[in-house]
Image (cartoon, rainbow, N blue to C red):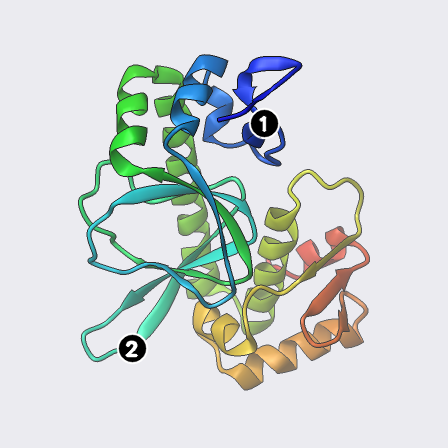
């Protein structure tokens, strides 16, 4: 692994990583980062690519560098349900699990840093700071899952669609300043409907209403502009 001339302990690939300090690698020393980088590899996937299969052996973890990943569960009759979305710098995979509990698919074009299961688990055992950071991510995802249960169980269709758009707006660029946001929807209308427990027609109708009310602008079907994030939040029912 080639090293940067200004910091010989950190590989060039890691120096240029957009999420290194915000993700799990922010808990690693330069020596630990160098050692782990010998096992990692950067991979690119196109939207729709399967990244891991439900109930398949868990062989690696991956940090999301860019893009959006969707998690799904499948019933015995083939019906599927989107149960979560993950964004940079989330870690894909459940620590110490022998098999994948969900199917993992690229919702958009994604860049991942893949890490063999055994390699990461060795580092976690010897690094309390890394273990704490990964635990914090797990607890944050648990809190978000509980909040989403409220969204699905109690909110109106209008509030559900607004909550989904707010989720995307705040997670794709969590450090953005100001009220304005713009992003490309990582899910199709059908997937949004699946995620929210609505029909495609209802999702389209509610998005058209948000557009008519000036809460969002829709450009080229999937590109969304939010002039004032506070107005979108006010439509979420919480």
Q: Earlier in the sequence, mark 2 or mark 1?
A: 1
Q: Residue at x 55, y 29 (%)?
A: 14
The answer to whether 194 is drawn above or below residue 121 in the figure is below
Q: Is residue 68 left or right of residue 223?
A: left
Q: Nearer the viewer, mark 2 or mark 1?
A: 1
Q: Residue at x 61, y 14 (%)?
A: 7
Residue 205: image location, x then y, percent: 64, 82
Q: Residue at x 40, y 57 (%)?
A: 149
Residue 53: image location, x then y, percent: 28, 60
Q: Nearer the viewer, residue 36 or 90?
A: 36
Q: Nearer the viewer, residue 50 or 55?
A: 50
Q: Is residue 3 left or right of residue 38?
A: right
| Location of mark 1 (residue) | 12
Residue 192: image location, x then y, percent: 52, 71
Helix, strand or loop status at disc 1: helix
Helix, strand or loop status at disc 2: loop
Q: Residues within 10 Å of mark 2 (few under 14, many from 20)?
A: few
| Location of mark 2 (residue) | 79
Distance of label 2 from label 1 (alpha carbons): 44 Å
Q: Residue furthest bottom?
A: 201
């Amino acid at each position: 692994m080639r090293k940067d001339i200004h910091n010989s302990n950190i590989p060039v690939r890691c120096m240029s990583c957009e999420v290194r300090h915000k993700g799990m690698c922010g808990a690693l020393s330069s020596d630990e980062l160098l050692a782990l980088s010998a096992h990692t590899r950067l991979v690119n996937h196109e939207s729709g690519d399967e990244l891991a299969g439900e109930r398949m052996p868990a062989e690696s973890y991956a940090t999301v560098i860019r893009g959006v990943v969707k998690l799904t569960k499948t019933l015995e009759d083939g019906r599927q349900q989107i149960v979560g979305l993950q964004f940079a710098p989330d870690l894909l995979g459940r620590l110490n699990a022998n098999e994948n509990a969900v199917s993992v698919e690229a919702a958009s074009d994604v860049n991942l840093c893949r890490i063999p299961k055994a390699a990461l688990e060795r580092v976690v055992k010897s690094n309390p700071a890394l273990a704490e950071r990964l635990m914090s991510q797990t607890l944050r995802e648990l809190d978000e899952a509980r909040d989403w249960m409220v969204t699905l169980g109690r909110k109106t269709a209008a509030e559900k669609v607004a909550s989904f758009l707010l989720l995307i707006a705040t997670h794709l660029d969590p450090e953005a300043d100001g009220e304005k946001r713009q992003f490309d929807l990582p899910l199709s209308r059908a997937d949004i409907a699946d995620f929210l427990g609505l029909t495609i027609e209802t999702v389209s109708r509610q998005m058209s209403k948000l557009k008519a009310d000036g809460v969002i602008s829709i450009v080229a079907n999937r590109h969304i502009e939010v002039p004032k994030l506070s107005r979108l939040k006010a439509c979420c029912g919480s």
